[in-house]
């Protein structure tokens, strides 16, 4: 691992080709909802990456700032139209503090799980709350841990398999850990393996982290189109509010 964490120059260079996450049908509903939640205020994206969400959100006229660990990811952001003017602080989203306040702080694409301890995830909630104006909201999009798919003795859950490659999550239910294994078929018969460590986290545990940070749950949906969150939802979009003083 480099100073860029698991998102070094090689990963950053191909990040925007990943798994359809840049498709308009994925990005647009997220940007629609985030724009509505930001209202006339400013937005802060924790782990802004290459600007998959931040750039279209900024294109809606919202002032978007970012915090990001990986300089390589930010280098990619800077190369894109509109990417040069987004203020980004290089740092850890659990601790990096901007001396500014926002009406919306958001953290998408399962990235709360990149913080691999409960302590760091709690610190991230506290940091998000510290960046919110009273009445502002913190939004997380993340998966629901797929433990219901694990038969006794099994630790692997496949989540992707097509002509572009395979993905398998490996669960450690004792430590609440998850290793995501990716095998990408990059052409010419070549396969590239990558993996990264995560800490999976339950919706109820996130609510407790929000409570520790002085926030309370306002909404939980099954997706960006405000679908109902049900027992079968594979992921959720949750909104916590920092109460007005
Ligand atoms: C899956 S990408 C998501 C990027 C972007 N938010 C998106 O939706 O495309 C995860 C990002 O989190 C960043 N990251 C991981 N741990 C971080 C941390 N502790 N603080 C800030 N950024 C972090 C990585 O460098 C990477 O850019």
Image (cartoon, rainbow, N blue to C red):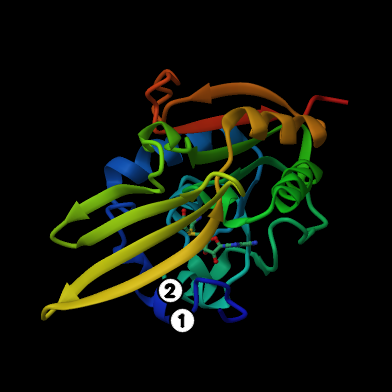
Looking at the image, which residue is at 48% across and 38% down?
A: 145
Q: Is mark 2 within 8 Å of ligand 1?
A: yes
Residue 214, image quadrant: top right
Q: Are marks 2 and 1 in contact (CB under 8 Å)?
A: yes
Looking at the image, which residue is at 64% across and 64% down?
A: 87
- Vertically, is 173 above or below 229? below
Q: Position of residue 116 (x, y in %)?
A: 63, 56
* Distance Cα–Cα, label 2 vs label 1: 5 Å
- Image quarter where the N terminus lies is bottom right
| Left-right relation of 96 to 168 | right
Q: Position of residue 178 (x, y in %)?
A: 50, 53
Looking at the image, which residue is at 49% across and 67% down?
A: 83
Closer to the camera in the image, 210 or 165? 165
Q: Secondary structure at mark 1?
A: helix
Marks counted in the figure total 2
For label 2, the residue is: 12
**Mark 1 Cα shell of 10 Å, populated few (<14), some (14-19), many (≥20):** some
Q: Position of residue 163 (x, y in %)?
A: 13, 60
Residue 81 visible within the image: no
Residue 95, image quadrant: bottom right
| Left-right relation of 239 to 27 | right
Q: Secondary structure at mark 2?
A: helix
For label 1, the residue is: 9
């Amino acid at each position: 691992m480099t100073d860029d964490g698991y998102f070094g120059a090689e990963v950053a260079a191909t990040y925007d080709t990943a798994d359809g996450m840049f498709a308009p049908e994925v990005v647009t509903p997220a940007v629609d909802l985030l724009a509505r939640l930001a209202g006339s205020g400013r937005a802060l994206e924790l782990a802004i990456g290459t600007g998959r969400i931040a750039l279209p959100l900024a294109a809606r006229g919202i002032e978007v700032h970012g915090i990001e660990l990986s300089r390589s990811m930010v280098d990619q952001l800077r190369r894109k139209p509109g990417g040069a003017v987004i203020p980004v602080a290089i740092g850890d989203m659990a601790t990096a503090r901007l001396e500014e306040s926002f009406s919306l702080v958001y953290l998408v694409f399962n990235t709360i799980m990149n913080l691999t301890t409960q302590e760091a995830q709690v610190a991230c909630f506290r940091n998000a709350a510290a960046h919110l104006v009273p009445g502002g909201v913190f939004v997380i999009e993340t998966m629901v841990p797929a433990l219901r798919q694990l038969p006794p003795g099994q630790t692997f859950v496949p989540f992707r398999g097509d002509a572009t490659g395979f993905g398998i999550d490996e669960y450690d239910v004792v430590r609440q850990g998850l290793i995501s294994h990716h095998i990408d078929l990059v052409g010419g018969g070549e396969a590239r393996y990558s993996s990264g460590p995560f800490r999976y986290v339950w919706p109820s545990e996130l609510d407790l982290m929000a409570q520790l940070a002085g926030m309370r749950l306002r909404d939980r949906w099954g997706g960006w189109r405000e679908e109902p969150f049900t027992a079968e939802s594979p992921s959720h979009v949750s909104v916590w509010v920092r109460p007005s003083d």
